Image: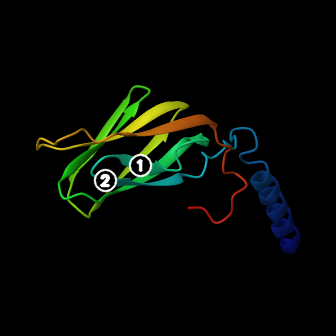
C-alpha cells in the first residue's frame, strides 16, 4: 500500500514538472557573435580592417597607436559618438559597440597642433548578421 502511494506521488510530481514553463517562456534569439576589428593610428591616417562588407551587430574595435603622440580615438556615425583615450604611443584602446547599418568614421585626435590632420578610417556596415543560436561554445 505504501509503495503504491509513493509511486502515485512520483507520477503526479513528474507530470507537474513536465508541464512547467511551456507557455510562459519564449526562446529569444541571441545576438550575433561579436566581430573583432583591428586598427592602427599612423602619422597620416587611421586604418581599420576589415572596413567593408561587414554586417551590423556587436563589434570590438581594438586600435593601436603607432605614432609618437597621445591620441584620443573617436567612433562617429548614425547618432553615435564614443571616445576613448588619450592613448599613449605604442599602446592600444578598445571600443565595444553594437552598430546599425550605415557609415561610421574612426578618428584620431591630439591636443598638440599637427602639420596636417590624420585622415579618419571609414567603416561601411551592412545588413545585420545572423543570430548566434547555432554557435557552440560561446559564453
Q: Which residue is mark 2?
A: 42
The mark that comes first in sequence, 2 or 1, is: 2
The one of 74 and 80 positioned closer to us in this rendering: 74
Q: Residue at x 88, y 69 (%)?
A: 4
The one of 58 and 91 positioned closer to us in this rendering: 91
Q: Is residue 72 above or below residue 9?
A: above
Q: Is residue 35 above or below residue 113?
A: below
The one of 53 and 58 positioned closer to us in this rendering: 53
Q: Residue at x 18, y 53 (%)?
A: 70
Residue sitting farthest toward the left: 112
Where in the figure is residue 121, as x and y percent of width and height?
Answer: 41, 41
Badge 1 density bin: few <14, some 14–19, many ≥20, Cα 10 Å: many
Q: Residue at x 84, y 61 (%)?
A: 11
Q: Is residue 107 left or right of residue 16?
A: left
Q: Is residue 69 above or below residue 24?
A: below
Where in the figure is residue 66, as x and y percent of width and height?
Answer: 29, 60
Discs 2, 1 touching: Cβ within 8 Å: yes
Q: Residue at x 30, y 47 (%)?
A: 44
SS at badge 1: strand
Where in the figure is residue 90, as x and y percent of width and height?
Answer: 26, 64
Q: Is residue 76 left or right of residue 26?
A: left
SS at badge 2: loop
Q: Quadrant of residue 135?
A: bottom right
Where in the figure is residue 118, as x and y percent of width and height?
Answer: 28, 42
Residue sitting farthest toward the bottom: 3
Residue sitting farthest toward the top: 79
Badge 2 density bin: few <14, some 14–19, many ≥20, Cα 10 Å: some
Q: Quadrant of residue 75?
A: top left
| Colour mapping used in the image | rainbow
Total marks placed: 2
Q: Is residue 57 above or below residue 14?
A: above
Residue 47: which numbered mark, if any?
1
Amino acid at each position: 500500500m505504501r509503495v503504491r502511494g509513493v509511486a502515485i506521488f512520483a507520477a503526479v510530481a513528474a507530470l507537474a514538472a513536465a508541464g512547467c514553463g511551456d507557455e510562459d517562456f519564449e526562446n529569444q534569439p541571441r545576438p550575433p557573435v561579436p566581430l573583432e576589428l583591428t586598427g592602427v593610428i599612423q602619422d597620416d591616417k587611421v586604418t581599420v580592417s576589415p572596413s567593408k562588407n561587414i554586417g551590423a551587430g556587436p563589434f570590438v574595435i581594438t586600435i593601436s597607436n603607432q605614432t609618437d603622440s597621445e591620441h584620443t580615438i573617436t567612433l562617429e556615425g548614425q547618432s553615435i559618438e564614443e571616445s576613448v583615450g588619450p592613448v599613449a604611443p605604442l599602446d592600444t584602446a578598445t571600443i565595444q559597440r553594437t552598430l546599425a547599418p550605415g557609415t561610421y568614421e574612426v578618428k584620431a585626435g591630439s591636443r598638440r597642433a599637427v602639420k596636417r590632420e590624420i585622415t579618419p578610417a571609414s567603416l561601411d556596415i551592412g545588413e545585420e548578421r545572423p543570430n548566434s543560436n547555432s554557435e557552440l561554445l560561446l559564453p
